[in-house]
Amino acid sequence: MKTASRAGAALGAAVLAALAASGPAQAQPGAASIGSGRGNSSAAVRCVQQGINSIVSDRFATQHDLIGVDGSFGPETDEAVRYVQYRLLGASEADGVVGPRTGDLIMRYQYGNYAACYPYVPTSN
């Protein structure tokens, strides 16, 4: 069981490395907005949750808790998105919807997950 688990992890790392080595990915300006009550894919929500956690870890670790990465855009994710929007984009942007401006911010923090997340997260360019 452990061998299969390690093999799966190694394969996943190899795929991510190959994607990263293929050059910078293009942003996804046509991706749908992500938010509560929208037709979100679980992959898109996971990308948002991972990005929000990276932002909080980097900028607001003492002021906000990390959120669960479960692929479901529930109240915890909504509140965390609003918090990050309010703190980094201003009160007028704190609507809990991940559109292009919030997507740009989230994608800057995706690091190793950029290639895997760019098809799902809306960006401005």
Image (cartoon, rainbow, N blue to C red):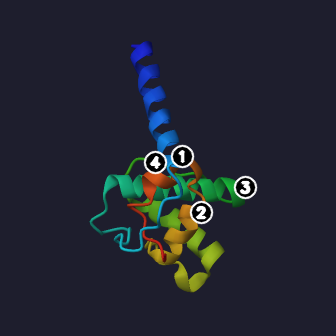
Residue 69 - label: 4
Q: CA distance from mark 4 to mark 2?
A: 18 Å
Q: What amino acid is at disc 1?
A: Ala
Mark 1 and mark 3 lie on one chain; the one further toward the N terminus is 1
Measured as percent of width and height from the top left, residue 51 is found at: 54, 57
* Label 2: which secondary element: helix
Measured as percent of width and height from the top left, residue 46 is found at: 42, 52
Mark 2 and mark 3 lie on one chain; the one further toward the N terminus is 3
One can see residue 19 in this view: yes
* Label 1: which secondary element: helix
Q: Report the residue marked by disc 3.
A: 62
Q: Which residue in the rendered view is the most extreme toward the bottom?
A: 92
Q: Nearer the viewer, mark 4 or mark 2?
A: 2
Q: Residue at x 52, y 77 (%)?
A: 101
Q: CA distance from mark 4 to mark 3?
A: 19 Å
* Label 4: which secondary element: loop
Residue 21 - label: 1
Q: Nearer the viewer, mark 1 or mark 4?
A: 1
Image quadrant in which you'd find residue 105: bottom right
Q: CA distance from mark 2 to mark 3?
A: 21 Å
Q: Residue at x 47, y 53 (%)?
A: 115
One can see residue 76 in this view: no
Q: CA distance from mark 2 to mark 1?
A: 18 Å
Q: Residue at x 61, y 54 (%)?
A: 54
Q: What amino acid is at disc 2?
A: Arg
Q: Report the residue marked by disc 2.
A: 108
Classify mark 3: residues with Cα within 10 Å, few (<14), some (14-19) or many (20+): few
